[in-house]
Image (cartoon, rainbow, N blue to C red):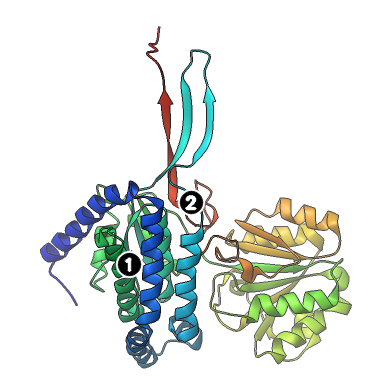
Amino acid sequence: MTHDSAELLALMTTLGREARAAARQLARAGTEAKNQALRLAAAALRRDADSIKAANALDMRAGRDKGLSPALLDRLLLDDARIEAMAKGLEDIAALPDPVGQEIARWQRPNGLDIARVRVPLGVIGIIYESRPNVTADAGALCLKSGNAAILRGGSESLNSSRAILACLRQGLAAAGLPDTALQMVPTTDRAAVGILLRMNDAVDVIVPRGGRSLIERVMAESRIPLFLHLDGICHTYVDGGADLAMARKVVLNAKMRRTGICGATETLLVDRKVAASHLAPLVEDLLAAGCEVRGDAASQAVDPRVRPASDEDWSTEYLDAILSVKLVDGVEGAIAHIERYGSHHTESIITGDEAAAAAFLAGVDSAIVLHNASTQFADGGEFGMGAEIGISTGKMHARGPVGVEQLTTFKYVVRGDGQTRA
């Protein structure tokens, strides 16, 4: 669906105006009303599962016709298990503490003024994402719980699926007596709509982009609105000289192959040169046996003829597929140096039984999430106990790591006095 420029501007202006009005109502909504909306939306997802799957089938058929890769088709697919996971995610978010109105700190001044720092919603959040339709449920639910309105702009590949999911969320809002305009979707695939959204600083308070590098670069270049950035997930697993081999094999295989198309999937395996003789071959063999293409440095190629040469570009590539680059490094400092040069500040893991090495890695790696003896696939708001996430923020301002309900609030100062005046 396309519109001329005047029609599109009018359409987006209306979305913004309705979202701003809904945000004012939602900011003052009680916890129980928001929770009821989420529980009713979860029930609607389960009740309308067949309709959601039918809408998803249209998207899957179009995706196959467009030649989407198996990894991207997997990101797009909705089945009974994934719909149930979305519904359960809404219920998990409903069960979380309401961040709105929480006192972060409180103190009194010598003059008797009582000062509190209190959480409040951000307002209206614009969320731009690509092919994963479950983001519609996660993002909508997190915004609702944190008292924010949202304008969602999903990818064209998932438009039918996202519309069906959003309809369930809006049913929940209306049934709970809240404005269903609190969650809206840009109803066109016209790319010009994104440009308008990025300039709607009178109606939108924060933009959250979730997608590939081209989307992020466009948003960074064009937005007049503050951003929660979610850059590439070039995640690393470093197998240290103090690593238990059995643990390393288990964690590395999971970190890469559990789901290759998510941002927390490991894309580069780093191995300490000290244990190359004992650890490198088994790790590479496990990956190859699981159907993973391995691209490596000279040492990695030497352990198996199926390992392809890695180019310099491989070290900075987010494959989102069953492909992994492998490199030997000189200890923790070598791993940190490689990650700093090629990484995206997303998620990195060290496998080691050496506590000093682990401490050095966790302190020295400048990424949003660092793990010790655990898979990078835990880089997920649900796994952190947040119910869900809008994304993994790789920036350093306000929100970093999984963006959940607390990260979707800001604060204001509430000052109580009894007639004080300033000299």
Quarter holding residue 371? bottom right
Measured as percent of width and height from the top left, residue 406 is found at 49, 50
Residue type, label 2: Gln
Do we see residue 388 in this rendering? no
Which residue is found at the position 80% from the left and 74% from the top? 247
Which disc is residue 148 wearing? none
Residue, x 72% and y 52% (percent of image)? Answer: 364
Q: Which mark is residue 172?
A: 1
Taking depth in this image into account, of 58 and 92 the one nearest to the observer is 92
- In terms of depth relative to the viewer, which is nearer, 404 or 94? 94
- Foreground residue, 77 or 36? 36
Q: Secondary structure at mark 2?
A: helix
Residue at left offset 46%, top offset 82%? 72
**Mark 1 secondary-structure assignment:** helix
Dot 2 alpha-carbon crowd within 10 angstroms: few under 14, some 14 to 19, many 20 or more: many
Looking at the picture, tell me which residue is in the foreground, 123 or 193: 123
Residue 407's label in the rendered image is 2
Horizontal and vertical percent position of residue 69? 47, 87
| CA distance separating discs 1 and 2 | 23 Å
How crowded is the residue under tag 1: few (<14 C-alpha within 10 Å), some, or many (20+)?
Answer: many
Residue 304 position (above or below residue 86)? below
* Total count of labels: 2
Report the side of 261 relative to 251 (left or right). Answer: left
Tell me the quarter of the picture where residue 136 sits: bottom left
Rendered-image quadrant of the N terminus: bottom left
1 or 2: mark nearer the eye: 1
Occupied quadrant, residue 419: top left
As drawn, 198 above or below 131: above
Mark positioned earlier in the residue sequence (1 or 2): 1
Compared to 311, does 146 lie above or below?
Answer: above
Q: Residue furthest top?
A: 423
